[in-house]
Image (tube, helix red, strand yellow):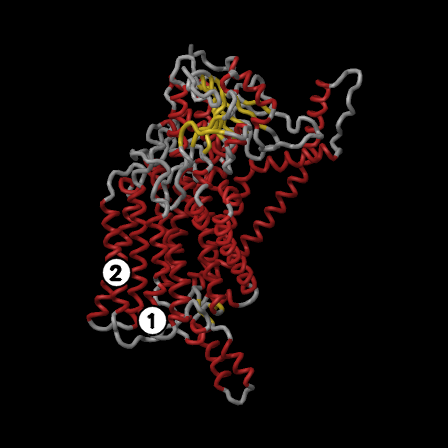
Amino acid sequence: MVRDDASLDTSLDGSTELRVHGVSGTPPETVLDHPLLKRVAGDERAGFYRRWYPGGRSADLTESRRLEAYGWGNLTSGPAARAAWLMLLPFMLVNLAHWMLPAIPAGAGRLVSVAGRASATLLRLFGVVLSITLVLTAVQAAMDVAGWQCAGHWRCGSSSPVTAALTDGWLSEPGRRVVVSGLVPMLVVLGIAMLGRKPLRRSTSVPEVPVATERDRPMTHAAFWKGNPGLPALRSAHVAAATALLAATIAWPATTLAASGPLRVVGVAICIAALATLATAVVAVAVEGIAGRGAHHSLLARAARSVATVLLILGVAFSLWDHGAWESAGRLPGTRAAILVTFVVGIVILALLTATVAVQRPWSQGRGGFRVSMRGLGAPAVAVVAYLIAGGFSAGLTYRVTDLLGYPVLSQATANAQRASLNLVIADESLPFATRQAAWSADIPLVLPPSFAWAGAAAAVIFAAILVIVALVALGVARRIGPVADVVAAEHNAAATETANPADPPAPAKPADPAVRRVALVVALASLTDGAGRIVGRVVLVAGLVLLAGLAVYVGGADNWRLIEEPPLSTLTAFGTWFMGAFALGLIGLAWSSARKPALRRTVGILWDIGSFWPRAAHPLAPPSYGERAVPDLVERITALNSHDESRVVLSGHSQGSILAVATVLQLPAGTARHVHLVTHGSPARRLYARHFPAYVDERTLRALIHDLGSWRNLYRDTDPIGAWILDPPRAPDPAVDRRLLDPPTLDAPIAGHGEYWLDPRYVEELTTLTTSVQPGHNDHE
């Protein structure tokens, strides 16, 4: 092949080392350790880069193999708008839970098979609960607290610029206040309809199995990375449910407090139709053929969305209609019931999800280092975490809005008594003017649902439990440092003996030496990743017990809410609501800062690099899957690089890049895969993926790669908290894949941990060995 410009190698034949970086969007310049690069394929969001030597000759033309890097960081940390997904963290978690569902056991009976398919359906329904929770948060904060209660009280409404326009003038009429304040939840619904509509890669979606079955290899399916055909219908159903709920919320106050005669019948009809539409949307979400990955019908969801939009317009018009005098009401009618019903439905779905997963006995899957995390109950556990975050954000944000406009109380009777007390002080002319003025400018009590206060008490208990668990974990780490230091000292003494001058041997390292203890501490901390599932499981267990206890007390009696207005629960509630408010404001502040600061946005992108790898299945507002773009990109590029008989590709993936590499080779045709040599380093393939997503990345799938590929080597360090061995445990005889790197190589050297392995001299040694010898246990394909 003729090369017109020797400064850049653009050829496809020969040997190519294709490097794929890990989390946080590592620049290609760092990956290739070269300051000047040119993109040879792809685009600005995800492209393939090679070293450029302007005015000179490219080293890729003279070395045994050229270097190439695939940069995909902008898929998760590029646009500033992507930082807004921080606010939608629960949606990402519920989508993650879908991929944590266990595979349906081979030869399972009808009950187990139905339970396996039902678990995916329940997660989609739980996603609707989270969407409705988001909308109800906006309803409670904007419509009830600000637009109805505060703006309906002249002193409260006129004291804040947020509500001043609704306190006096044409907008002060109750129906108009409902509609104007309802613009906030309408924007939330619009966000559900618009955010993340476009996938990161345009392709024709193909129906795929909704839940994996044991002994299947789902990630080898051609349709796996081609998008979810049910996603448009799933989004339409979420929008329909949220819009219908909002239509009923807007129409109900006028129906119950103002309308009479035939107009009241019209209002009731709008609300009933809205609830029926909401139910229809829920049915659409539950049907696999409409909103699932095996979908092929979307008419029902789209029809429900159109009907809900019409009902919202009718609800707005009905609320704006001149109904005459309005009856007084402290709270916005219907909101308390809607919040309580949503909370109870969420708890019921979580309980059913736990049952359907437990029926499959997931704790029996996997063995040894591949034993599933959290006894296979990771999906319901992560769903509980998503619910806790959503509930904490909802209650915390509402409490902070209430604090901004007034102060929260839990009953209308309490609010009326405290307002009456202030009015008596204001009206008492015998009191000093300063006292009456202070009462006039005092904050007004605003009523919040008692369930929010219960959430605050639960948050305080869960926070205390987390502190206890963290303390126990820290104690465990401290106890491990001693035994680990013995091993570290012995290994470094052995390594030093091999390289030392026999005439001048170095002084042996001792377990008590500070340098040894430093390494031992890092190793002990890195090993915590293996027990992360147990830690999350304990937190979820405490949270579940607290939520069930709170629910039992709350629904056990009409006046049980008074328990949290009196000590000691009132103190617990006050701390919990403060903690939730700080969490909500902190999340908003982090999203705002991430949008303005690219460096922070890349750091936040680490979370999305892990959470947005999988396609969207349980919630339409989960971040778009970069795997749907990156895996096909890599497959196409490797196929092009293997277009010649003498071509050979070394696919080298670090950290999350190693997961992309594994997903890529699972999609390669057998003839192409035989010419690919895989190098993974700092890989979480077993430690995180096989133990948390066993239906998709299990031991059988990983072991099959030994025979599918030209060869495979995995490099890991004990100091790495993310990467670990994959198929060969430490000190296993004749390891087929894994090679352990001593870190640090000497006790006075820096600890590399999860750092870039390809800058380690031992990486080059292993790469040379890999490409010049046949891997142990590997079948000869030639």
Pick the front one: 755 or 265: 755
Query: Looking at the figure, which quarter contains the N terminus?
Result: top left
384 displayed left or right of 507 = left
Relative to 537, residue 66 above or below? above
The amino acid type found where label 2 is placed reads Ile
When asked about the image quadrant of residue 675, the answer is top left
Residue positioned most to the top: 782
- Who's the residue at 31% across and 69% down the image? 175
Pick the front one: 599 or 355: 599
The x and y percentages for residue 684 are: 51, 32
When asked about the image quadrant of residue 323, the answer is bottom left
Determine which residue is flagged by label 2. Answer: 313
Relative to 12, residue 406 above or below? below
At label 1, counting other C-alpha atoms closer than 10 Å, the crowd grade (few under 14, some 14-19, many 20 or more) is some
The x and y percentages for residue 602 are: 50, 42
Pick the front one: 458 or 669: 669
Question: In the rendered structure, which disc, 2 or 1, sits on the residue that comes first in sequence?
Answer: 1
Q: How far apart are the two marked residues, 2 and 1, measured between alpha carbons?
A: 18 Å
Determine which residue is flagged by label 1. Answer: 171
SS state under label 2: helix
Tag of residue 302:
none
